[in-house]
């Protein structure tokens, strides 16, 4: 893992509401960002591709390395907002979480 070059905020999984007119489900309200901590942000252009256990190909742009001392709950499907050291902000949906490394938590999306 390299140096920290940004921070992140995250959301919890939102409750969904069913629209009675259309029958579609959507997130209820706007998400509230929970402050995270400093992290290492790696952006890949073009997007990286990984073969899932189900045989499906997944593409992701961001790889975020979070120090292991972070105690929040990061789950697949939640939103994450990264803020790089130069002030650029971007948001994405978490596609994977790897917390097996003893030094950091890796999140990609």
Image: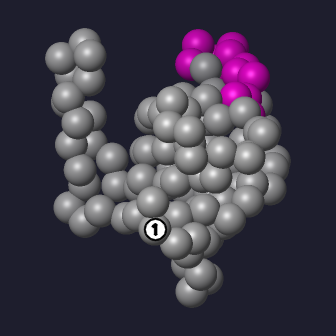
Q: List the residue tagged with mark 1.
A: 2
Residue at image position (26%, 16%) is: 53
Residue at image position (20%, 61%) is: 46
**Left or right position of 51 against 108:** left
Q: Is 77 located above or below residue 71 in the figure?
A: above
Quick check: can you spot residue 22?
A: no
Q: Is 38 located above or below residue 52 in the figure?
A: below
Report the span colored magenta: 12-24
Q: Nearer the viewer, residue 103 or 25?
A: 103
Q: Nearer the viewer, residue 28 or 2?
A: 2
**Left or right position of 46 against 19:** left
Say what secondary structure mark 1 lies in: loop
Residue at image position (50%, 37%) is: 101
Residue 79: image quadrant is top right
Q: In the rendered structure, does residue 40 fall within the stretch colored magenta? A: no
Residue at image position (21%, 22%) is: 56
Q: Nearer the viewer, residue 1 or 75?
A: 1
Colouring = one colour
Quadrant of the frame with the C terminus: top left
x then y, percent, for residue 88: 55, 78
**Left or right position of 28 against 53:** right
x then y, percent, for residue 15: 75, 23
Quadrant of the frame with the N terminus: bottom left
Q: Is 50 located above or below residue 23 in the figure?
A: below
Q: Residues within 10 Å of mark 1 (few under 14, many from 20)?
A: few
Residue farthest along the front direction in this orientation: 102
Q: In the rendered structure, does residue 22 fall within the stretch colored magenta? A: yes
Residue farthest along the bottom direction in this orientation: 86
Q: Main secondary structure of the magenta part?
A: loop
x then y, percent, for residue 85: 59, 81
Quick check: can you spot residue 106?
A: yes
């Amino acid at each position: 893992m390299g140096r920290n070059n940004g921070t992140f905020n995250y959301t919890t999984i939102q409750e969904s509401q069913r629209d009675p007119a259309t029958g579609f489900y959507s997130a209820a309200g706007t998400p509230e960002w929970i402050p995270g901590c400093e992290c290492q942000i790696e952006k890949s252009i073009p997007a990286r591709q990984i073969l899932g256990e189900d045989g499906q190909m997944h593409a992701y742009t961001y790889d975020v390395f979070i120090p292991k001392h972070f105690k929040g709950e990061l789950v697949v499907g939640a939103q994450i907002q990264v803020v790089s050291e130069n002030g650029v902000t971007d948001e994405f949906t978490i596609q994977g979480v790897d917390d097996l490394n003893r030094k950091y938590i890796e999140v990609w999306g």
